[in-house]
Image (cartoon, rainbow, N blue to C red):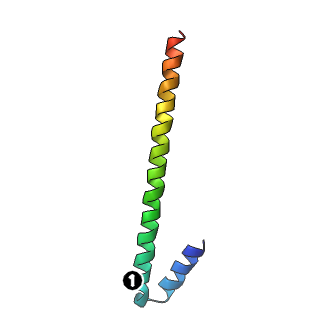
């Protein structure tokens, strides 16, 4: 929330803050990419576990 407020303040200050706003957006983009990588890893692990459970259930039939 504080980051959004800081960005809004920069925006209100006009075009002289474009470099700072661009840097803030790039940092946010990196944060999203990092989070996506974590989520992708979690999905991979979950898929592996589900596959294993499917195999166990199949063997029990």
User: Can you give x and y, in whole percent of width and height, for residue 57 in the image?
Assistant: 53, 17
Work out which residue is located at the far top of the displayed protein and give it. Answer: 61
Residue drawn at 50 percent across, 22 percent down: 54
Work out which residue is located at the far right of the displayed protein and give it. Answer: 1
Towards the viewer: 24 or 52 = 52
Crowding at mark 1 (Cα within 10 Å: few <14, some 14-19, many 20+): few
Residue drawn at 47 percent across, 34 percent down: 47
Quarter holding the N terminus?
bottom right
**Relative to 7, is 14 above or below?**
below
User: Can you give x and y, in whole percent of width and height, for residue 46 in the image?
Assistant: 51, 36
Occupied quadrant, residue 23: bottom left
**Relative to 28, is 39 above or below?**
above
Residue named by callout 1:
19
User: Can you give x and y, in whole percent of width and height, for residue 32 in the image?
Assistant: 46, 60
**Relative to 30, is 39 above or below?**
above
Residue drawn at 55 percent across, 74 percent down: 4
User: Can you give x and y, in whole percent of width and height, for residue 48 in the image?
Assistant: 47, 32
């Amino acid at each position: 929330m504080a980051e959004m407020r800081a960005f809004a303040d920069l925006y209100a200050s006009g075009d002289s803050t474009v470099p700072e706003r661009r840097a803030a957006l790039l940092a946010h983009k990196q944060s999203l990419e990092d989070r996506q990588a974590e989520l992708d890893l979690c999905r991979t692990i979950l898929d592996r576990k589900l596959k294993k459970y499917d195999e166990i259930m199949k063997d029990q039939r």
